[in-house]
Amino acid sequence: MLASSLNAQDPKNRTVTDSINENVRKSCLVCGSRKIHYDFSIGKFRIEECVDCSLMRLNPQPTDEELGEIYSKNYFITLDNNYARVSALKSDTADHYLNLLESYTKSPLKGRLLEIGCGQGDFLVKAADRGLDVTGVEYSSHAVGIAKDKLGGRGQVVCGEITQL
């Protein structure tokens, strides 16, 4: 993933990429701790956990091709025969989380909101309804198209990774 943002064909970048990948394998992305332990495996992926901050991660990280397969248009649950019910549940869930954020700030939400892994945009729509300047990042191009349609120009949705912002 990170390697795809660098030109892997350039020998200089290959060294940088190898160094970054080696560091990622050895330390926590959140707190930098090198205390990483194995929890369990799913197929070829190890699930590892940081002893200091409890972040859990896949190692190795999926390739861009694997991510494309995972986040295909079939990834998101829509229940075609009950779309209205699913949409209402997602909308209610978004309102719940936004209300929770307001309870922490003790005032109406204002400013900008970034949602990483925004899916089909339900949370972004509710946040935009409350006046927030919203941006979403989503790996699935299919979901990005739906999110953009739902937002109707009231925010930005980027297809890819956070590094593309």
Image: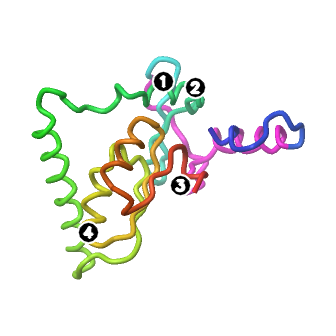
Amino acid type for the residue under numbered disc 3: Val
Residue on which the image places disc 3: 30
Q: Residue furthest right?
A: 11
Residue 61, horizontal then vertical, whole percent: 57, 33
For the N terminus, which image quadrant? top right
Query: Mark 4 against mark 3, which lies toward the viewer?
Result: 4
Mark 1: secondary structure: helix
Mark 1 crowdedness (10 Å alpha carbons): few <14, some 14-19, many ≥20: few
Query: Mark 4 against mark 1, which lies toward the viewer?
Result: 1
Amino acid type for the residue under numbered disc 4: Leu
Q: Nearer the viewer, residue 152 or 80?
A: 152
Residue 164, horizontal then vertical, whole percent: 60, 52
* Above-or-below relation of 154 to 71: below
Residue on which the image places disc 1: 69
Query: Mark 2 against mark 4, which lies toward the viewer?
Result: 2
* Above-or-below relation of 135 to 14: below
Q: Earlier in the sequence, mark 3 or mark 2?
A: 3
Residue on which the image places disc 4: 101
Residue 77 part of the magenta segment: no
Amino acid type for the residue under numbered disc 2: Glu
Residue on which the image places disc 2: 65
Q: Earlier in the sequence, mark 2 or mark 4?
A: 2
